[in-house]
Image: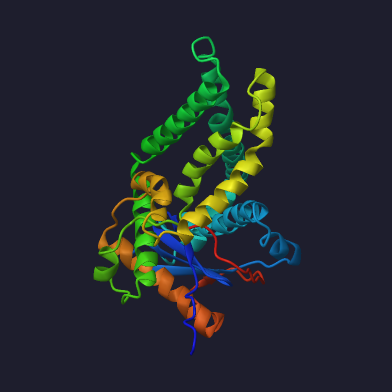
Amino acid sequence: MSQQKTPPAYGGQALIEGVMFGGKKDTVTAIRRKDDSIEYYHVPRESHPVRTKLKKIPLIRGIVALIESAGNGSKHLTFASDRYDVMPGEEEEHAKEEETSKLVMILGVAAVGVLSFIFGKFVFTLVPVFLAELFQSVAPSKTAQIMIESFFKLFLLLTYIGLISMTPLIKRVFQYHGAEHKVINNYESNMEMTVENVQSQSRLHYRCGSSFILFTVIVGMFIYFLVPTDPLWLRVLNRILLIPVVLGVSFEVLQLTNAVRNVPVLRYLGYPGLWLQLLTTKEPDDKQVEVAIASFEKLLEVEEHGVGVLNPQIAIDTEETNDPKPLLS
């Protein structure tokens, strides 16, 4: 008796006026241009023997996946940011304008990178530590301190997401995030890829980077119970040193919740992550869904027939790559 082949898992990323989808060997972006046309961008996945081996090791594979996801996603994000608001045919003029401010652009990107690192790693990791320390006189126990610290970490996370979601640009990105999830859910439901079918799907998905972010808060709380909280300098030090551990374990928890999402009781393990997605995704309109469908279908076409199906007007990153597994959605 023939065994039913497990369908491949696909991941994606919402962009400015577009969506990127990735498979085992290729990633494809579709964006809505200023003239209402859809443009594509293709980047093959990188493959390195050492990295491939590391991605088979539990805990470590999550760190590798995050680094790869960030690197690959930045290419697609740059493409979308550079072209979504430029009329086709005006790219050269736009490029010349960019050349005149190249130094400013480089300094700007560097500043954003530094600020993102400081905000992500220190604000969300260390500020809750110092806030919890303020309650040391009324809640001195280790358990109380860790609970308070985790509360502040969650509060900062929700506040940050809530504030940025109010901006028009981020709101539209969150709509494309919802469209991305709807397309994946529609594909996994084996339904025809039409706008109507996709719109009927949930905008939430178990295998999502938003869920991963929340799991870092929950997992971190339990890991912190295993290390001392006093004195304060030691608490700060172990929080920094444990960042890779928290990320690695959280990735495994994310994979687990996705694996058991169809088990009646265990499916609830992933609900906290789905609740956070109520903030990081918004209901997309039909035109946004059209872009997401276009991106996904172009990826399937490339996987089946090769990059030769990409016509000349499709932007292609010619770096020769080949990566084994899709990452977070």
Query: Which of the 4 image quarters holds residue 14?
Result: bottom left
Q: Is residue 62 above or below residue 21?
A: above
- Residue 227, given in percent of the width and then of the height, sits at 66, 30
Q: Is residue 186 above or below residue 225?
A: below
**Residue at the top extreme?**
137
Is 184 positioned to the left or the right of 120 in the image?
A: left
Which residue occupies 62% across, 37% down?
A: 114
Query: Which of the 4 image quarters holds residue 291?
Result: bottom left
| Front-lying residue, 6 or 82 | 6
- Residue 299, given in percent of the width and then of the height, sits at 47, 74
Q: Is residue 321 above or below residue 136?
A: below
| Front-lying residue, 93 or 281 | 281
Q: Is residue 284 above or below residue 21?
A: above
* Count of marks placed on residues: 0
- Residue 80, given in percent of the width and then of the height, sits at 47, 58
Q: What is the basis of the colouring in this image?
A: rainbow
Which residue occupies 67% across, 53% down?
A: 60
| Front-lying residue, 250 or 94 | 250
- Residue 67, given in percent of the width and then of the height, sits at 63, 53
| Front-lying residue, 180 or 96 | 180
Q: Can residue 287 be seen in this view?
A: yes
Q: Is residue 34 visible?
A: no
Which residue occupies 46% across, 77% down?
A: 300
Query: Which of the 4 image quarters holds residue 33?
Result: bottom left
**Residue at the bottom extreme?**
1
